Image (cartoon, rainbow, N blue to C red):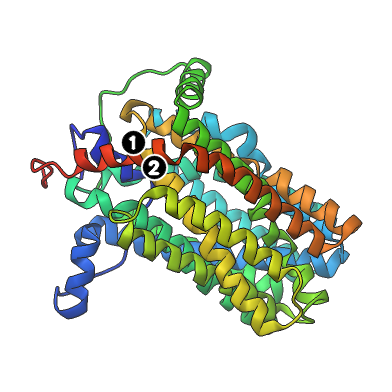
Amino acid sequence: MMISKRSPEEEYIISESPEICVGENTGWIKQVARAFPALQNKSYRAYFSGQLISLIGTWLQIVSQGWLVLQLTNSALQIGLIAALSTLPSLFLTLFGGVIVDQFPKQKILLATQAASMLLAFTLGILTLTGEVTVWMIGITAFLLGIVTAIDSPARQAFISEIVTKEQLPSAIALNSGIFNAARVIGPSIAGLLIALIGTGGAFIVNGFSYIAVLIALLWMKVQFPTERRKLHAIRAIKEGLTYSFTHPIIRTLIIFTGVSSVFGWSYTTLMPLIAQNTFHLGAAGLGYLYAASGLGSLLATLLIATFSKKISPEIFILGGSILFAISLILFSYTSHLLMGLILLFLTGLGLLSQFAMMNTVIQSLVSSELRGRVISIYILMFIGLTPIGNIGAGWLAEHIGTGATMRTGALVILIFSSVILYYRNKIRTAYDAYKKKIEKPDYTTG
């Protein structure tokens, strides 16, 4: 279904969600439906179901790829390089991806990107199962998948605007973050078991089949693409989006902090295969437990923001999340006790996703609707596109100063940069409060 004439305040939340089948509105299910109105949308439910399965498969591939590189090379730097290759295209192509998304039907774009991702997963799986796989083959596959992701990510986020009603929009960001983090919990746990049972090649094949679910959902949905579209010159459109983002004081600050957190915060996950093997003496299943612990914390962060974002000022989530993440990661870098490590990883995921999810929410609450796609692509550039720097840097540092010192360095940078958020806290709170007053107007109804 196509929704017309949305206000910028209503449209902001489009960027972040899909959901799950609700069934009858009875008992706790009814309460969930009230909390997340998007759950009532049939097209949205279909899209959610497909995305959930597909994202679980994606995490199968992430974990299996890291473990395979570790088995082939036993090198932290090589793991970091391969992880960097999977996100490097986002650094150069995501801005163009945002322009493409504004020009063509998002449903067709997603059909193409999901099919391409499926083909790459099957290719890597076959190469691994036949024993022909090498590190450079993994690198090429990771790079090609990164190119697909540079277009897929902004399309997937913006597509939600075409399948939900106005009253369902406020639940979109929380639901999208929720599905991603639920997959982060389920995927790594399954990956560890699958690697033990059928090997990394089999896990890649399972990921390939997981894309069928989202392809079926996309083919089933009937979505109308708007016939009137503004023609955009790619370079001029990108420049316009960059100018808007980096001249807006709050959006600029949050986007820059997103990049800093991506480089110095998120990169710790690249070291997980090495930490699992050398610090905790775990196999592939144990690696899955480490990823899942962080994912559980991230999932809790999503639920907390969905529940309390209207009651708690955004800077509390951003600052509190940054501090919790940094302290937990520093403590994790010193422990060799598995249970304590899992608890600290849980807190690390809780802190990191609290700050990321709230920064994303504030950015999109302030952005002008006609520039939404391009601002989303800039956010993705900072969130995903800069991770190669963090991945390579983390791998290089780990080989020279050790994994513990590498994680502590990143955590300290996050703590230092949090002072900028502290400086802007009142402006962030004022701007977000003004947004909430607009979105809560009495005329905000289903249209």
Q: Secondary structure at mark 1?
A: helix
Q: Where's residue 390, x and y in %?
A: 71, 48
Of the numbered discs 2 and 1, the one sitting upstream in the chain is 2
Quadrant where the image shows the C terminus:
top left
Residue 209 seen in render? no
Residue lying farthest to the left in this orientation: 442
- Residue at 74% x, 48% y: name it: 140
> Can you tell which mark lies on residue 362?
2
Q: Amino acid at mark 2?
A: Val
Q: Where's residue 225, x and y in %?
A: 28, 35
Depth check: give the residue in front, 444 or 328: 328
How far apart are the alpha carbons under marks 2 and 1? 9 Å
Are there few (<14), some (14-19), or many (20+) residues within 10 Å of tag 1? some
Q: Amino acid at mark 1?
A: Ala
Drawn side of residue 42 relative to residue 14, left or right? left
**Residue 98 vertical placement versus 257 (above, below):** above
Cβ–Cβ under 8 Å for marks 2 and 1: yes
Q: Secondary structure at mark 2?
A: helix
Q: Where's residue 33, x and y in %?
A: 20, 66
> Can you tell which mark lies on residue 431?
1
**Residue 79 vertical placement versus 299 (above, below):** above
